[in-house]
Image: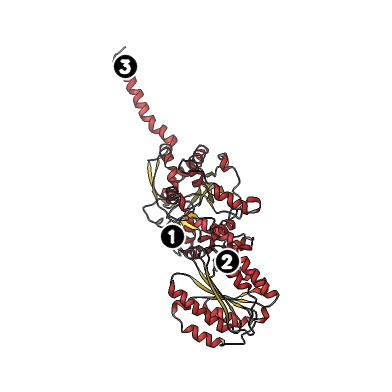
Protein backbone atom coordinates (compact mmCIF):
# COMPACT_ATOMS: atom_id res chain seq x y z
CA UNK A 1 0.00 0.00 0.00
CA UNK A 2 1.32 3.41 -0.90
CA UNK A 3 2.25 5.44 2.15
CA UNK A 4 0.45 8.35 0.59
CA UNK A 5 -2.96 6.66 0.55
CA UNK A 6 -3.84 7.13 4.27
CA UNK A 7 -2.92 10.77 3.92
CA UNK A 8 -5.03 11.04 0.76
CA UNK A 9 -8.01 9.45 2.46
CA UNK A 10 -7.59 11.77 5.44
CA UNK A 11 -7.35 14.79 3.16
CA UNK A 12 -10.43 13.69 1.23
CA UNK A 13 -12.40 13.26 4.46
CA UNK A 14 -11.32 16.67 5.71
CA UNK A 15 -12.30 18.29 2.43
CA UNK A 16 -15.64 16.51 2.51
CA UNK A 17 -16.30 17.67 6.06
CA UNK A 18 -15.21 21.14 5.13
CA UNK A 19 -17.63 21.18 2.24
CA UNK A 20 -20.39 19.68 4.36
CA UNK A 21 -19.98 22.03 7.32
CA UNK A 22 -21.71 25.03 5.69
CA UNK A 23 -24.54 22.74 4.65
CA UNK A 24 -24.93 21.42 8.20
CA UNK A 25 -24.84 24.98 9.51
CA UNK A 26 -27.48 25.99 6.99
CA UNK A 27 -29.81 23.37 8.43
CA UNK A 28 -30.04 25.41 11.63
CA UNK A 29 -29.47 28.99 10.43
CA UNK A 30 -29.62 29.92 6.80
CA UNK A 31 -27.85 32.99 5.49
CA UNK A 32 -25.17 35.22 6.95
CA UNK A 33 -25.09 36.20 10.59
CA UNK A 34 -27.04 39.40 11.26
CA UNK A 35 -26.88 42.09 13.95
CA UNK A 36 -30.14 43.91 14.71
CA UNK A 37 -30.22 47.06 16.83
CA UNK A 38 -33.16 47.05 19.25
CA UNK A 39 -34.78 49.92 21.15
CA UNK A 40 -35.85 48.07 24.28
CA UNK A 41 -37.60 48.72 27.57
CA UNK A 42 -35.12 48.77 30.50
CA UNK A 43 -37.29 46.08 32.10
CA UNK A 44 -36.06 43.68 29.43
CA UNK A 45 -32.51 43.73 30.74
CA UNK A 46 -33.50 40.46 32.43
CA UNK A 47 -33.59 38.64 29.06
CA UNK A 48 -29.92 39.43 28.39
CA UNK A 49 -28.71 35.98 29.58
CA UNK A 50 -30.69 34.34 26.77
CA UNK A 51 -29.42 36.50 23.92
CA UNK A 52 -26.18 34.57 23.50
CA UNK A 53 -28.12 31.36 22.97
CA UNK A 54 -30.43 33.16 20.54
CA UNK A 55 -27.41 34.16 18.47
CA UNK A 56 -25.96 30.64 18.58
CA UNK A 57 -29.22 29.06 17.42
CA UNK A 58 -30.30 31.61 14.80
CA UNK A 59 -27.24 33.60 13.76
CA UNK A 60 -29.06 36.80 14.77
CA UNK A 61 -27.41 39.05 17.31
CA UNK A 62 -29.60 41.53 19.16
CA UNK A 63 -27.84 44.73 20.14
CA UNK A 64 -30.10 46.09 22.88
CA UNK A 65 -30.40 49.80 23.62
CA UNK A 66 -32.34 50.03 26.90
CA UNK A 67 -34.20 53.33 27.13
CA UNK A 68 -37.22 54.24 29.24
CA UNK A 69 -39.85 55.63 26.89
CA UNK A 70 -43.63 55.53 27.10
CA UNK A 71 -44.32 55.89 23.39
CA UNK A 72 -41.10 54.55 21.82
CA UNK A 73 -39.77 58.03 21.13
CA UNK A 74 -36.89 57.50 18.75
CA UNK A 75 -38.26 54.25 17.35
CA UNK A 76 -38.41 55.75 13.87
CA UNK A 77 -34.71 56.46 14.05
CA UNK A 78 -33.24 54.47 11.15
CA UNK A 79 -30.52 53.19 13.47
CA UNK A 80 -33.09 50.80 15.02
CA UNK A 81 -34.21 47.63 13.28
CA UNK A 82 -36.56 46.42 16.01
CA UNK A 83 -38.32 47.75 19.08
CA UNK A 84 -39.12 45.68 22.16
CA UNK A 85 -41.19 47.71 24.64
CA UNK A 86 -43.40 46.58 27.48
CA UNK A 87 -46.30 47.71 25.32
CA UNK A 88 -46.70 49.34 21.91
CA UNK A 89 -50.11 50.90 22.63
CA UNK A 90 -49.08 54.56 22.91
CA UNK A 91 -46.66 54.19 19.99
CA UNK A 92 -49.33 52.77 17.69
CA UNK A 93 -51.80 55.51 18.67
CA UNK A 94 -49.16 58.14 17.93
CA UNK A 95 -48.32 56.47 14.64
CA UNK A 96 -51.98 56.40 13.64
CA UNK A 97 -52.46 60.08 14.48
CA UNK A 98 -49.21 61.27 12.88
CA UNK A 99 -50.78 61.71 9.45
CA UNK A 100 -47.58 60.62 7.78
CA UNK A 101 -49.07 57.51 6.26
CA UNK A 102 -46.54 55.26 7.98
CA UNK A 103 -47.55 51.61 7.95
CA UNK A 104 -48.24 49.86 11.21
CA UNK A 105 -45.20 47.70 11.96
CA UNK A 106 -45.40 43.95 12.29
CA UNK A 107 -45.71 43.12 15.98
CA UNK A 108 -45.63 39.86 17.96
CA UNK A 109 -46.50 39.45 21.64
CA UNK A 110 -43.68 37.59 23.41
CA UNK A 111 -44.78 37.40 27.07
CA UNK A 112 -47.33 39.01 29.36
CA UNK A 113 -47.50 40.71 32.74
CA UNK A 114 -50.24 42.80 34.41
CA UNK A 115 -49.58 46.05 36.27
CA UNK A 116 -50.31 45.32 39.93
CA UNK A 117 -49.64 46.61 43.46
CA UNK A 118 -47.04 45.30 45.87
CA UNK A 119 -47.77 46.08 49.54
CA UNK A 120 -45.66 45.60 52.61
CA UNK A 121 -47.20 42.85 54.78
CA UNK A 122 -48.24 45.34 57.49
CA UNK A 123 -49.95 47.66 55.00
CA UNK A 124 -51.66 44.74 53.25
CA UNK A 125 -53.09 43.55 56.58
CA UNK A 126 -54.33 47.06 57.41
CA UNK A 127 -56.08 47.50 54.08
CA UNK A 128 -57.63 44.03 54.02
CA UNK A 129 -59.11 44.60 57.47
CA UNK A 130 -60.90 47.68 56.08
CA UNK A 131 -62.45 45.92 53.08
CA UNK A 132 -65.27 43.37 53.37
CA UNK A 133 -63.90 40.10 52.04
CA UNK A 134 -60.38 41.53 51.93
CA UNK A 135 -60.29 41.71 48.11
CA UNK A 136 -58.60 45.02 47.31
CA UNK A 137 -59.31 47.30 44.37
CA UNK A 138 -57.72 50.39 42.85
CA UNK A 139 -60.45 52.33 44.65
CA UNK A 140 -59.25 50.93 47.97
CA UNK A 141 -55.67 51.91 47.12
CA UNK A 142 -56.82 55.42 46.15
CA UNK A 143 -58.86 55.72 49.36
CA UNK A 144 -55.88 54.64 51.47
CA UNK A 145 -53.59 57.05 49.62
CA UNK A 146 -56.04 59.89 50.23
CA UNK A 147 -56.23 59.29 53.98
CA UNK A 148 -52.47 58.77 54.35
CA UNK A 149 -52.48 55.01 55.00
CA UNK A 150 -50.60 54.16 51.79
CA UNK A 151 -47.50 55.85 50.39
CA UNK A 152 -46.58 54.36 47.05
CA UNK A 153 -43.95 54.43 44.35
CA UNK A 154 -44.80 54.45 40.63
CA UNK A 155 -42.72 55.17 37.53
CA UNK A 156 -43.31 58.51 35.82
CA UNK A 157 -46.19 58.12 33.28
CA UNK A 158 -44.60 60.78 31.09
CA UNK A 159 -41.53 58.61 30.50
CA UNK A 160 -42.41 55.05 31.44
CA UNK A 161 -44.86 52.71 29.77
CA UNK A 162 -45.26 50.91 33.10
CA UNK A 163 -46.22 54.16 34.83
CA UNK A 164 -48.58 55.02 31.99
CA UNK A 165 -50.25 51.59 32.12
CA UNK A 166 -50.69 51.98 35.89
CA UNK A 167 -52.21 55.44 35.46
CA UNK A 168 -54.62 54.22 32.76
CA UNK A 169 -55.63 51.33 35.02
CA UNK A 170 -56.37 53.60 37.98
CA UNK A 171 -58.19 56.18 35.85
CA UNK A 172 -60.30 53.49 34.16
CA UNK A 173 -61.31 52.14 37.55
CA UNK A 174 -62.10 55.69 38.73
CA UNK A 175 -64.36 56.30 35.72
CA UNK A 176 -66.42 53.29 36.77
CA UNK A 177 -67.68 52.57 33.24
CA UNK A 178 -66.07 49.15 32.84
CA UNK A 179 -64.79 50.12 29.39
CA UNK A 180 -61.89 52.03 27.83
CA UNK A 181 -61.48 55.65 28.91
CA UNK A 182 -63.32 58.28 26.87
CA UNK A 183 -62.67 62.02 26.65
CA UNK A 184 -65.42 62.75 29.17
CA UNK A 185 -63.92 60.30 31.64
CA UNK A 186 -60.81 62.43 32.05
CA UNK A 187 -62.53 65.81 31.90
CA UNK A 188 -63.09 65.44 35.65
CA UNK A 189 -59.90 64.09 37.15
CA UNK A 190 -60.62 61.98 40.20
CA UNK A 191 -57.03 60.98 40.78
CA UNK A 192 -55.93 63.79 43.08
CA UNK A 193 -56.47 61.72 46.20
CA UNK A 194 -54.62 58.78 44.68
CA UNK A 195 -51.78 61.06 43.55
CA UNK A 196 -51.43 62.54 47.03
CA UNK A 197 -50.07 59.18 48.21
CA UNK A 198 -47.20 59.01 45.72
CA UNK A 199 -43.87 59.51 47.46
CA UNK A 200 -41.47 57.78 45.05
CA UNK A 201 -41.00 58.01 41.29
CA UNK A 202 -38.37 57.43 38.61
CA UNK A 203 -38.07 57.51 34.83
CA UNK A 204 -38.47 53.72 34.72
CA UNK A 205 -39.65 50.97 37.02
CA UNK A 206 -36.21 49.37 37.41
CA UNK A 207 -34.82 52.66 38.76
CA UNK A 208 -37.94 53.00 40.90
CA UNK A 209 -37.36 49.59 42.50
CA UNK A 210 -33.69 50.35 43.11
CA UNK A 211 -34.67 53.59 44.86
CA UNK A 212 -37.25 51.78 46.97
CA UNK A 213 -34.71 49.15 48.04
CA UNK A 214 -32.27 51.89 49.08
CA UNK A 215 -34.94 53.95 50.87
CA UNK A 216 -37.67 51.54 52.01
CA UNK A 217 -39.00 53.99 54.58
CA UNK A 218 -40.27 56.36 51.90
CA UNK A 219 -43.04 54.06 50.65
CA UNK A 220 -45.01 51.00 51.70
CA UNK A 221 -46.31 50.08 48.24
CA UNK A 222 -44.99 49.75 44.70
CA UNK A 223 -47.06 49.84 41.52
CA UNK A 224 -45.30 47.93 38.75
CA UNK A 225 -45.52 44.85 36.56
CA UNK A 226 -46.26 41.64 38.42
CA UNK A 227 -43.03 40.21 36.96
CA UNK A 228 -40.86 42.94 38.48
CA UNK A 229 -42.37 42.52 41.93
CA UNK A 230 -42.02 38.74 41.80
CA UNK A 231 -38.41 39.15 40.69
CA UNK A 232 -37.78 41.55 43.57
CA UNK A 233 -39.37 39.15 46.05
CA UNK A 234 -37.10 36.35 44.78
CA UNK A 235 -34.01 38.30 45.88
CA UNK A 236 -32.72 39.03 49.37
CA UNK A 237 -33.02 42.81 48.87
CA UNK A 238 -36.14 43.23 51.03
CA UNK A 239 -36.72 42.79 54.75
CA UNK A 240 -39.92 40.91 53.85
CA UNK A 241 -41.49 40.09 50.47
CA UNK A 242 -44.16 42.42 49.15
CA UNK A 243 -47.69 41.04 49.04
CA UNK A 244 -48.83 41.23 45.43
CA UNK A 245 -52.38 42.50 44.91
CA UNK A 246 -54.28 42.05 41.64
CA UNK A 247 -56.88 44.86 41.93
CA UNK A 248 -60.45 43.62 41.71
CA UNK A 249 -61.49 46.46 39.39
CA UNK A 250 -59.02 45.36 36.72
CA UNK A 251 -55.49 45.76 35.44
CA UNK A 252 -53.78 46.82 32.24
CA UNK A 253 -51.92 43.88 30.73
CA UNK A 254 -48.58 44.38 28.95
CA UNK A 255 -47.57 41.85 26.29
CA UNK A 256 -43.93 42.88 25.62
CA UNK A 257 -44.25 42.83 21.82
CA UNK A 258 -41.33 42.65 19.39
CA UNK A 259 -41.82 45.17 16.58
CA UNK A 260 -40.23 45.10 13.13
CA UNK A 261 -39.20 48.66 12.26
CA UNK A 262 -37.00 47.94 9.23
CA UNK A 263 -38.92 45.66 6.87
CA UNK A 264 -35.68 44.71 5.10
CA UNK A 265 -34.86 42.69 8.23
CA UNK A 266 -38.03 40.59 8.12
CA UNK A 267 -36.23 37.23 7.62
CA UNK A 268 -34.04 37.84 10.67
CA UNK A 269 -37.03 39.16 12.63
CA UNK A 270 -38.99 35.98 11.90
CA UNK A 271 -36.08 33.86 13.13
CA UNK A 272 -35.98 35.79 16.39
CA UNK A 273 -39.75 35.60 16.89
CA UNK A 274 -39.89 31.88 16.15
CA UNK A 275 -37.05 31.26 18.60
CA UNK A 276 -38.63 33.37 21.34
CA UNK A 277 -41.95 31.56 20.98
CA UNK A 278 -40.43 28.08 21.13
CA UNK A 279 -41.64 26.00 24.05
CA UNK A 280 -38.20 25.67 25.62
CA UNK A 281 -37.49 29.39 25.22
CA UNK A 282 -40.85 30.38 26.66
CA UNK A 283 -40.27 28.11 29.62
CA UNK A 284 -36.87 29.69 30.22
CA UNK A 285 -38.25 33.23 29.80
CA UNK A 286 -40.91 32.50 32.40
CA UNK A 287 -38.34 31.11 34.81
CA UNK A 288 -35.91 33.95 34.25
CA UNK A 289 -38.27 36.96 34.11
CA UNK A 290 -41.44 35.88 36.00
CA UNK A 291 -43.55 36.94 33.01
CA UNK A 292 -46.45 34.85 31.81
CA UNK A 293 -45.85 32.78 28.66
CA UNK A 294 -47.84 33.38 25.47
CA UNK A 295 -47.14 29.80 24.35
CA UNK A 296 -50.06 27.80 25.74
CA UNK A 297 -47.98 24.63 25.83
CA UNK A 298 -45.92 26.09 28.66
CA UNK A 299 -47.15 25.67 32.23
CA UNK A 300 -46.43 28.86 34.20
CA UNK A 301 -44.59 28.84 37.51
CA UNK A 302 -46.93 28.48 40.54
CA UNK A 303 -47.15 32.23 41.35
CA UNK A 304 -48.31 32.84 37.75
CA UNK A 305 -51.01 30.20 37.50
CA UNK A 306 -53.81 32.30 38.91
CA UNK A 307 -55.93 34.03 36.29
CA UNK A 308 -55.05 37.65 35.63
CA UNK A 309 -58.64 38.71 36.21
CA UNK A 310 -60.29 41.69 34.57
CA UNK A 311 -57.98 43.03 31.86
CA UNK A 312 -58.71 46.72 31.32
CA UNK A 313 -58.83 48.19 27.83
CA UNK A 314 -56.39 50.89 26.78
CA UNK A 315 -57.90 54.12 25.35
CA UNK A 316 -58.27 54.14 21.57
CA UNK A 317 -57.28 57.80 21.15
CA UNK A 318 -53.88 59.34 21.83
CA UNK A 319 -55.49 62.61 22.97
CA UNK A 320 -57.13 60.80 25.88
CA UNK A 321 -53.83 59.34 27.04
CA UNK A 322 -52.00 62.65 26.65
CA UNK A 323 -54.66 64.53 28.58
CA UNK A 324 -54.59 61.98 31.38
CA UNK A 325 -50.79 62.18 31.64
CA UNK A 326 -50.85 65.99 31.53
CA UNK A 327 -53.52 66.14 34.25
CA UNK A 328 -51.45 63.87 36.47
CA UNK A 329 -48.41 66.10 35.97
CA UNK A 330 -44.95 65.66 37.40
CA UNK A 331 -45.18 62.98 40.10
CA UNK A 332 -42.01 64.31 41.73
CA UNK A 333 -43.80 67.58 42.52
CA UNK A 334 -46.42 67.47 45.25
CA UNK A 335 -49.64 69.05 44.03
CA UNK A 336 -52.71 69.65 46.15
CA UNK A 337 -55.87 71.52 45.25
CA UNK A 338 -57.73 74.32 46.92
CA UNK A 339 -61.49 74.17 46.57
CA UNK A 340 -63.78 76.99 47.64
CA UNK A 341 -67.29 75.71 48.44
CA UNK A 342 -69.99 78.40 48.35
CA UNK A 343 -73.01 76.81 50.05
CA UNK A 344 -76.51 78.28 50.04
CA UNK A 345 -77.84 78.48 53.61
CA UNK A 346 -80.98 80.43 52.81
CA UNK A 347 -84.22 79.46 54.55
CA UNK A 348 -85.33 77.20 51.68
CA UNK A 349 -82.45 74.84 52.51
CA UNK A 350 -83.98 73.89 55.89
CA UNK A 351 -85.09 70.31 56.39
CA UNK A 352 -84.31 67.52 53.91
CA UNK A 353 -82.18 69.74 51.69
CA UNK A 354 -79.67 70.68 54.37
CA UNK A 355 -79.65 67.04 55.50
CA UNK A 356 -78.70 66.06 51.93
CA UNK A 357 -75.91 68.66 51.91
CA UNK A 358 -74.50 67.39 55.22
CA UNK A 359 -74.65 63.81 53.95
CA UNK A 360 -72.77 64.86 50.82
CA UNK A 361 -69.96 66.38 52.88
CA UNK A 362 -69.83 63.28 55.08
CA UNK A 363 -69.44 61.18 51.93
CA UNK A 364 -66.61 63.41 50.69
CA UNK A 365 -64.96 63.04 54.10
CA UNK A 366 -64.70 59.26 53.70
CA UNK A 367 -68.13 57.89 54.67
CA UNK A 368 -68.99 56.78 51.11
CA UNK A 369 -67.91 53.11 50.72
CA UNK A 370 -68.54 52.95 46.96
CA UNK A 371 -65.77 52.86 44.39
CA UNK A 372 -66.60 56.33 43.05
CA UNK A 373 -66.82 57.65 46.62
CA UNK A 374 -63.32 56.42 47.42
CA UNK A 375 -61.89 58.20 44.39
CA UNK A 376 -63.79 61.43 45.07
CA UNK A 377 -63.07 61.90 48.79
CA UNK A 378 -61.15 64.77 50.38
CA UNK A 379 -57.47 63.94 50.71
CA UNK A 380 -54.48 64.78 52.87
CA UNK A 381 -52.91 68.11 51.95
CA UNK A 382 -56.01 69.44 50.19
CA UNK A 383 -56.99 72.97 51.20
CA UNK A 384 -60.73 73.44 51.61
CA UNK A 385 -62.75 76.58 52.23
CA UNK A 386 -66.44 76.45 53.14
CA UNK A 387 -68.46 79.67 52.82
CA UNK A 388 -72.04 79.57 54.10
CA UNK A 389 -74.13 82.34 52.58
CA UNK A 390 -77.67 83.67 52.58
CA UNK A 391 -78.28 87.32 51.78
CA UNK A 392 -74.65 87.81 52.87
CA UNK A 393 -71.71 85.66 53.99
CA UNK A 394 -72.75 83.91 57.20
CA UNK A 395 -69.52 82.03 57.94
CA UNK A 396 -66.19 81.21 56.32
CA UNK A 397 -63.86 78.40 57.38
CA UNK A 398 -60.64 77.15 55.75
CA UNK A 399 -58.71 74.00 56.64
CA UNK A 400 -55.80 72.09 55.18
CA UNK A 401 -56.67 68.43 55.58
CA UNK A 402 -54.10 66.65 57.75
CA UNK A 403 -56.28 64.22 59.68
CA UNK A 404 -59.87 63.45 60.59
CA UNK A 405 -60.03 66.40 62.98
CA UNK A 406 -59.86 68.82 60.04
CA UNK A 407 -62.64 66.93 58.29
CA UNK A 408 -64.75 67.11 61.45
CA UNK A 409 -64.19 70.87 61.51
CA UNK A 410 -65.68 71.13 58.04
CA UNK A 411 -68.51 68.85 59.04
CA UNK A 412 -69.30 71.08 62.02
CA UNK A 413 -69.37 74.12 59.73
CA UNK A 414 -71.86 72.47 57.39
CA UNK A 415 -73.88 71.24 60.38
CA UNK A 416 -74.43 74.82 61.62
CA UNK A 417 -78.15 75.49 62.03
CA UNK A 418 -78.15 79.21 61.26
CA UNK A 419 -79.77 80.25 57.97
CA UNK A 420 -80.12 83.50 56.05
CA UNK A 421 -83.30 85.18 54.92
CA UNK A 422 -82.29 85.77 51.28
CA UNK A 423 -80.12 84.31 48.49
CA UNK A 424 -77.23 86.47 47.27
CA UNK A 425 -75.83 84.07 44.65
CA UNK A 426 -73.65 86.51 42.69
CA UNK A 427 -72.35 88.34 45.75
CA UNK A 428 -71.30 84.95 47.14
CA UNK A 429 -69.57 84.07 43.87
CA UNK A 430 -67.74 87.42 43.82
CA UNK A 431 -66.60 86.67 47.39
CA UNK A 432 -65.41 83.25 46.24
CA UNK A 433 -63.23 84.83 43.56
CA UNK A 434 -61.68 87.19 46.10
CA UNK A 435 -60.67 84.09 48.05
CA UNK A 436 -59.43 82.47 44.84
CA UNK A 437 -57.33 85.55 44.05
CA UNK A 438 -55.70 85.36 47.48
CA UNK A 439 -55.00 81.64 46.97
CA UNK A 440 -53.43 82.19 43.55
CA UNK A 441 -51.27 84.99 44.89
CA UNK A 442 -50.06 82.92 47.87
CA UNK A 443 -49.32 79.74 45.90
CA UNK A 444 -49.49 80.23 42.11
CA UNK A 445 -48.94 76.56 41.29
CA UNK A 446 -51.80 75.23 43.43
CA UNK A 447 -54.90 74.39 41.33
CA UNK A 448 -57.92 76.32 42.59
CA UNK A 449 -61.59 75.84 41.80
CA UNK A 450 -64.91 77.22 43.05
CA UNK A 451 -68.01 75.12 43.71
CA UNK A 452 -71.29 77.06 43.97
CA UNK A 453 -74.32 75.21 45.39
CA UNK A 454 -77.70 76.93 45.52
CA UNK A 455 -81.35 75.86 45.56
CA UNK A 456 -82.88 79.21 44.64
CA UNK A 457 -82.70 82.29 42.43
CA UNK A 458 -80.67 85.39 43.26
CA UNK A 459 -82.80 87.90 45.23
CA UNK A 460 -80.19 89.94 47.10
CA UNK A 461 -76.80 91.56 46.59
CA UNK A 462 -75.27 92.24 43.17
CA UNK A 463 -76.65 90.92 39.89
CA UNK A 464 -75.03 88.59 37.38
CA UNK A 465 -73.79 91.39 35.11
CA UNK A 466 -72.02 93.10 38.00
CA UNK A 467 -70.41 89.81 39.00
CA UNK A 468 -69.25 89.34 35.40
CA UNK A 469 -67.76 92.86 35.34
CA UNK A 470 -65.82 92.15 38.54
CA UNK A 471 -64.70 88.75 37.27
CA UNK A 472 -63.40 90.23 34.00
CA UNK A 473 -61.42 92.80 35.98
CA UNK A 474 -59.43 90.07 37.72
CA UNK A 475 -55.93 89.10 36.64
CA UNK A 476 -55.54 86.39 33.98
CA UNK A 477 -54.34 83.78 36.50
CA UNK A 478 -57.46 84.25 38.63
CA UNK A 479 -59.75 84.14 35.58
CA UNK A 480 -58.40 80.63 34.96
CA UNK A 481 -60.12 79.48 38.17
CA UNK A 482 -63.30 77.65 37.07
CA UNK A 483 -66.67 77.67 38.78
CA UNK A 484 -68.72 74.47 39.00
CA UNK A 485 -72.30 75.37 39.91
CA UNK A 486 -74.46 72.65 41.45
CA UNK A 487 -78.07 73.14 40.41
CA UNK A 488 -80.46 72.15 43.19
CA UNK A 489 -84.13 72.72 43.85
CA UNK A 490 -85.54 75.88 42.27
CA UNK A 491 -82.18 77.43 41.29
CA UNK A 492 -81.99 79.23 37.94
CA UNK A 493 -80.29 76.61 35.75
CA UNK A 494 -79.78 78.98 32.82
CA UNK A 495 -78.03 81.57 35.01
CA UNK A 496 -75.81 78.95 36.64
CA UNK A 497 -74.90 77.53 33.25
CA UNK A 498 -73.90 81.02 32.07
CA UNK A 499 -71.61 81.41 35.09
CA UNK A 500 -70.01 78.05 34.38
CA UNK A 501 -69.44 78.90 30.71
CA UNK A 502 -68.01 82.33 31.55
CA UNK A 503 -65.46 80.90 33.99
CA UNK A 504 -64.50 77.72 32.17
CA UNK A 505 -66.39 75.38 34.50
CA UNK A 506 -69.42 73.14 34.10
CA UNK A 507 -72.83 72.99 35.72
CA UNK A 508 -73.96 69.77 37.41
CA UNK A 509 -77.65 69.09 38.01
CA UNK A 510 -78.16 67.50 41.44
CA UNK A 511 -81.83 66.97 40.63
CA UNK A 512 -80.89 64.13 38.30
CA UNK A 513 -79.21 62.13 41.07
CA UNK A 514 -78.35 63.59 44.47
CA UNK A 515 -76.18 66.26 46.02
CA UNK A 516 -73.64 63.61 46.97
CA UNK A 517 -73.38 62.37 43.38
CA UNK A 518 -73.18 65.93 42.07
CA UNK A 519 -70.27 66.80 44.36
CA UNK A 520 -68.50 63.57 43.43
CA UNK A 521 -68.94 64.35 39.75
CA UNK A 522 -67.16 67.67 39.94
CA UNK A 523 -64.32 66.62 42.24
CA UNK A 524 -61.02 67.62 40.67
CA UNK A 525 -62.52 69.05 37.48
CA UNK A 526 -60.31 71.27 35.40
Q: Position of residue 457 (x, y in %)?
A: 63, 84
Q: Which mark identifies residue 407? A: 2
SS at mark 1 in the image = loop
Of labels 1 and 3, earlier in sequence is 3
Q: Position of residue 389 (x, y in %)?
A: 59, 80
> Residue, x 50% and y 79% (percent of image)?
433
Q: Which residue is mark 1?
A: 332
Percent from the top left, x then y, of residue 489?
Answer: 67, 78
Is the residue 18 above or below the residue 419 in the image?
Answer: above
Horizontally, residue 362 falls left or right of residue 448, namely right
Residue 163 seen anywhere in this rendered image of the structure: yes
- For the residues carrying marks 1 and 3, which lies nearer the camera in this image? 1
Foreground mark, 3 or 2, reads: 2
The residue beneath circle 3 is: 5
Q: 470 or 103: which is nearer to us? A: 470
Q: Is residue 81 left or right of residue 487?
A: left
Binning the other alpha carbons within 10 Å of mark 3 as few (below 14), some (14 to 19) or many (20 upward) gives few
Report crowding for label 1: few under 14, some 14 to 19, many 20 or more residues within 10 A (C-alpha): few
Of callouts 3 and 2, which one flags the residue occurring earlier in the amino acid sequence? 3
Real-space CA distance between mark 3 and mark 2, rounded to the nearest whole angstrom: 103 Å
Amino acid sequence: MSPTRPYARTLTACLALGLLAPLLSACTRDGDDVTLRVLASPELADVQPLLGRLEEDTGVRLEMDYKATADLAGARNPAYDLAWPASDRSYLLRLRDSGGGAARPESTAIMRSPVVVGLTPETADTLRDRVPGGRLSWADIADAAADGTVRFGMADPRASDTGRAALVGVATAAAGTGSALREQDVSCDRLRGFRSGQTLTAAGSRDLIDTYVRQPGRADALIAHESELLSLNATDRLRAPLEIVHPEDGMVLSDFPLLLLDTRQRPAYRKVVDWLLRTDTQRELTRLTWRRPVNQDVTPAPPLRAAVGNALSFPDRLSIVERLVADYGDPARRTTDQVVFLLDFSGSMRGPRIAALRAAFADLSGADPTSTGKFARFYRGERLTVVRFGGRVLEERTVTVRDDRDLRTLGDTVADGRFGDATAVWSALAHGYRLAADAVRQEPRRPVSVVLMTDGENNAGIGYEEFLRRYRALGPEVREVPTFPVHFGEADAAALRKAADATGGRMVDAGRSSLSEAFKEIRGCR
